[in-house]
Image: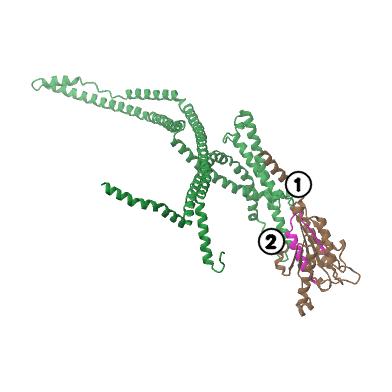
Amino acid sequence: MVWPENPAASVLVLAALGMLFLYAARKPMHSLIQSLGRTAMGPLRLGARWLNGAADRMAHRNRAVLLAHGRQETETRIEREFERIGELVTRELQGYPTLQRKLLDEITRVEEDYRKCGEVPPAPPEWVEAVTAMGNVKGSNEMVQRVLEEIQRSVKAIHDKAITEYRKAYESRHRILEGFMPFWRSLDKTLGRVDRNIGSLHSSAASVDAQMQKYEQIVAGNDKAESMLTVSAFTQFAIAALVLAVAAGGAFINFKLIALPMSEMVGAGDYITASLRTSEVAALVIILVEASMGLFLLEALRITHLFPRIANLNDRMRHRILWIALTLLVTLAGVEAALALMRDMLIADKQALLQTLATAPQAAVTDGWVGRIPTAGQMLLGFMLPFALAFIAIPLESLIHSGRTVGGVLAASLVRIAAFALRLAGNAARHASRVLVNLYDVAIVIPLLVERLVVEMPRRAAAPEVDEAERTHA
Amino acid sequence: MLKRLLAVLLVLGAYGCADPKEHSHAVYMLIDTSGTYAQESAKAQRIVNYLLGTLQPGDSLAVARVKSRSFSEKDIIAKATFESRPSQANAQKRAFRDAIDNSLRLVMPSRYTDITGAMIQGAEYLNEAGAGRKTIIVFSDMQEELDKVTVRDFPISLRDIHIVAVNVVKLSTDNVDPRRYLGRLDDWKKRVEAAGAREWRVINDLERLDSILTRS
């Protein structure tokens, strides 16, 4: 305090002195603040630019990997489609010449039969002319009448005979036509089969067309293909993650089934960490080994392709691996079933011990067939779960493949967000330096006003003289 | 990366090779058989049963009598370190229960109560057992009575041992002046804490036996 008895005056004096000092240091302080702002902004912008570049490179690499993976997958699908078509052609159409021959035979036979059943017109009645001639004889001649009556009788007899023959002929034609039916049916069936085969071929060809269209888009590397593949990868990732979560639930149940009986094998008193028993780790290892065997099994079956080395093995070696993996899996499943049984026995033993230790008598557990259901269920679960777990190789492969795309996209997005944040921070630093400069000027507003007045006074004094001179000149 | 993996494996291996006893629990139970307290043996049996039901394979349990002079292995009624295989551990527990049943049936009341000597014996047993967690359960009224010859007024060591006094019944004199009871418990608390015990607890409600072995 300058004057301790008058703090207000002291503060005023100190403020005035401070203001004067700040006014004197105005230019260097402005420079300092601005250079600080620039110093902060420069590296931040540089960092943002670098991160943007890195994000672009990542996106480019992701795109390349995505398109390559998509191309490979589409190639495989097209290959499978062609294989299917090949199989169809081999299976269904290799008998096509026979089929055609059969068809032609049947058609020829039908034609022959048709020809056979063609209607033969009755012979022209020659006696009609004789009757006409007799009718033209003039006068009533008894002889003529008799002749006519004789003709009538003969004609009637012939007519009856002709009608009978005609009916017989029709009957035989009807029989022939009736005999057509199986041939028509067979013809219809054969044609239907041909139609189905052609339809199946047509749909396969359409599928190949669609795949080829997709393949062309991927090869062209356009944005539509990239977007389609990215969406597909995200969907696959989500589905695979969901299935793996379900499998993890199964693995947990499996772990619970065998953790307790494993203590009978490796001991219950051994700990790896303060809360992790060796028996629990052993149970976990068994489950992981089962999952690995499942993985090898599916690899050997060429369902998954996580290990190219297995896929590239010759068929004999691959079959050996398949059988080894299957044998181990079945053995482990059997061990698990036995462990599940042992778990039940251990729990029952513990329960019996607790009953004998309890002061108050407890109700005895019924030992009927109902009581054996959980045991059987546990054993069945213990045997089935390893096989169910073996299939996690499929979603795992899907997760790994789609994870590359999903991870890449997320990482690129994170890098872009970081670049944006750095750019924002750089701009904020620049604006903060400007605000600080203005705040500095606000703090020394009085000396600045004085300065302005001092600077503007000679100008104002000069201004009326100039006006006067201009007026005089005018 | 490979070095890190190796380091993790080494750490895991070191953990795996650690003494398994560090994770086990050793319990030494003292049963007061002096005077009228000898009638409480049924309750003591209940506590032993609870301990048998709670202790895990690999844990140790010993039950000893508190007599006129109790700093002796001869006072141990039964002791066992349970096998690591649960089925064998259960068989041991059954045998242990039978041994306790037979011994407590034939218990004879003693004239004096040497709690300090029994505690020293218990601490010795627990330290030899080398368990990670050590507990002495004192089933007594905590009224120590020594003959003129027995010397127990010296500092004892109960380092890292949990002391749990169970069923500390009130004596007829305590009913006249409860300060005697409270003062007795307070004296024991001070004494065991001075001896380096990790914890001192009193549990009188036998319905809460589950808190005997809970970690504080």
Callout 2: chain? A
Colouring: by chain
Picture coordinates of residue A10, whole percent (x, y): 53, 64
Q: Secondary structure at mark 1?
A: loop
Kind of residue at disc 1: Cys
User: Is residue B26 at all visible to an observer of this figure?
Assistant: yes
Residue B216: image quadrant is: bottom right
Q: Nearer the viewer, mark 1 or mark 2?
A: 1
Report the magenta stretch's main SS: helix
Rendered shade, chain B: brown
Residue A244 lies, with reference to residue A135, above or below; the image says below
Magenta stretch: residue B25 in it? no
Query: Distance between the Cα atoms at labels 1 and 2?
Result: 43 Å
Q: Point out the stretch of residues depicted in magenta.
A: B39-64
> Which corner quadrant of the image does residue A214 belong to?
top left
Colour displayed for chain A in the image of the structure: green
Q: Amino acid at mark 2?
A: Ala
Task: State the residue position of label 1.
Answer: B17
Residue highlighted by disc 2: A364
Instruction: Give the residue furthest to the left.
Output: A139
Label 2 Cα neighbours within 10 Å, binned few <14 / some 14-19 / many ≥20: few
Q: Position of residue A190 (x, y in %)?
A: 41, 29
Residue A408: percent from the left, percent from the top? 53, 40
Is A203 above or below relative to B46?
A: above
